[in-house]
């Protein structure tokens, strides 16, 4: 168990460096703004995305993955938006552009960043599948929720570049990330003006005992996705995982298949 004093020292360091609230990339902010305007056109969104060639290429790659692929291969932004719609594309852009936040220089910290993003990509792909097959929830919001569930870990990993002790102890760094990312992540999605649902996701993502009234929500989907990814079928005290029960999902049956692998590769490309 991490010493609370160390956790507080990390938070203090994050505040000192001014990285507690990473800035959402400009392409994500502008694409959201365009998609929310009722008089916006497909070309308006194309013009925004085209200014970030890396995101444009990634968007086409994801649109051609098994999650979204149609009969014909997509090779242009206009085709992507026509097929998927402006709202879905803007959410995908936010999802993909968050990868730009995962940057580091020190070899150990860079590896931690890569692993953090790769795991988030896996959770996003699984969350998309679970939402599609077990709920009536918005599958693109599930994808974004999966990618964002660990966004609060970014400042922790970034600040570790300045702390030799953490560079030499990957397990300790990982524990700090797990402990601090819920509260830091909640502040980040609030600052980004995301709907409250995403705050619930980042707060509860690693809470296998999470319960609530009513039908399954996006937090349930992400919790179940994390359980699937980690091979977990019960809570630490040996009870069924409520999120999986609410979804009607048998965690003993793996959802990992070619479609999921394809989606993970598309989401992880370029890292």
Image (cartoon, grey):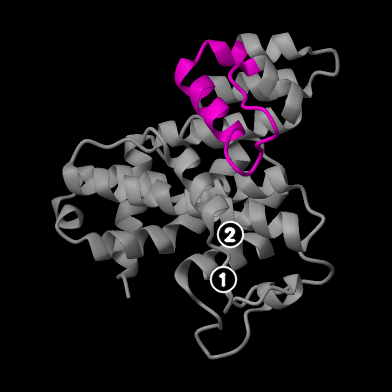
Of the pair 226 and 155, the residue shown nearer to us: 226
The answer to whether residue 80 of the structure is visible from this angle is yes
The residue at the point 55 percent across, 20 percent down is 27
The residue at the point 41 percent across, 62 percent down is 178
Name the quarter where the C terminus is drawn.
Answer: top left
Looking at the rendered structure, the secondary structure element under dot 2 is helix
Image side of residue 256 versus residue 222, left or right: left
Q: Is residue 41 above or below residue 219?
A: above
Q: Position of residue 224 (x, y in %)?
A: 61, 67
Report the disc number at residue 203: 2
Name the quarter where the N terminus is drawn.
Answer: bottom left
Residue linked to disc 1? 207
Residue 203, quarter of picture? bottom right
Q: Position of residue 79 (x, y in %)?
A: 68, 19
Q: Are marks 2 and 1 in contact (CB under 8 Å)?
A: yes
Q: CA distance from mark 2 to mark 1?
A: 8 Å
Q: Is residue 198 above or below residue 241?
A: above
Looking at the rendered structure, the secondary structure element under dot 1 is loop
Of the pair 188 and 239, the residue shown nearer to us: 239
Q: Label 2 neighbourhood size at 10 Å, few (<14), some (14-19), many (20+)?
A: some
Of the pair 27 and 166, the residue shown nearer to us: 27
The answer to whether residue 184 of the structure is visible from this angle is no
Q: Which residues are magenta?
A: 48-77
| Residue 64 part of the magenta-drawn span | yes
């Amino acid at each position: 168990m991490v010493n609370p004093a160390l956790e507080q020292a990390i938070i203090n360091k994050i505040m000192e460096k001014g990285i507690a609230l990473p800035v959402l990339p400009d392409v994500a902010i502008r694409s959201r703004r365009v998609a929310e305007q009722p008089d916006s056109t497909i070309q308006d969104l194309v013009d925004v995305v085209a200014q970030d060639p890396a995101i444009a290429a990634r968007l086409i790659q994801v649109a051609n993955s098994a999650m979204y692929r149609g009969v014909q291969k997509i090779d242009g932004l206009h085709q992507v938006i026509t097929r998927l719609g402006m709202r879905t594309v803007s959410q995908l852009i936010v999802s993909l552009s968050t990868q730009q936040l995962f940057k580091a220089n020190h070899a150990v910290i860079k590896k931690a960043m890569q692993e953090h993003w790769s795991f988030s990509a896996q959770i996003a792909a699984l969350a998309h599948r679970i939402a599609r097959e077990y709920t009536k929830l918005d599958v693109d919001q599930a994808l974004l929720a999966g990618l964002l569930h660990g966004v609060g870990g970014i400042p922790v990993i970034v600040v570790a570049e300045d702390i030799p002790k953490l560079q030499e102890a990957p397990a300790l760094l990982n524990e700090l990330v797990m402990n601090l990312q819920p509260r830091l992540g909640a502040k980040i999605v609030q600052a980004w003006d995301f709907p409250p649902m995403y705050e619930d996701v980042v707060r509860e993502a690693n809470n296998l005992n999470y319960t609530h009234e009513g039908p399954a929500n996006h937090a349930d989907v992400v919790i179940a996705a994390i359980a699937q990814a980690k091979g977990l079928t019960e809570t630490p005290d040996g009870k069924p995982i409520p999120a999986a029960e609410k979804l009607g999902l048998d965690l003993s049956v793996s959802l990992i298949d070619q479609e999921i692998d394809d989606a993970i590769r598309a989401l992880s490309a370029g890292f």
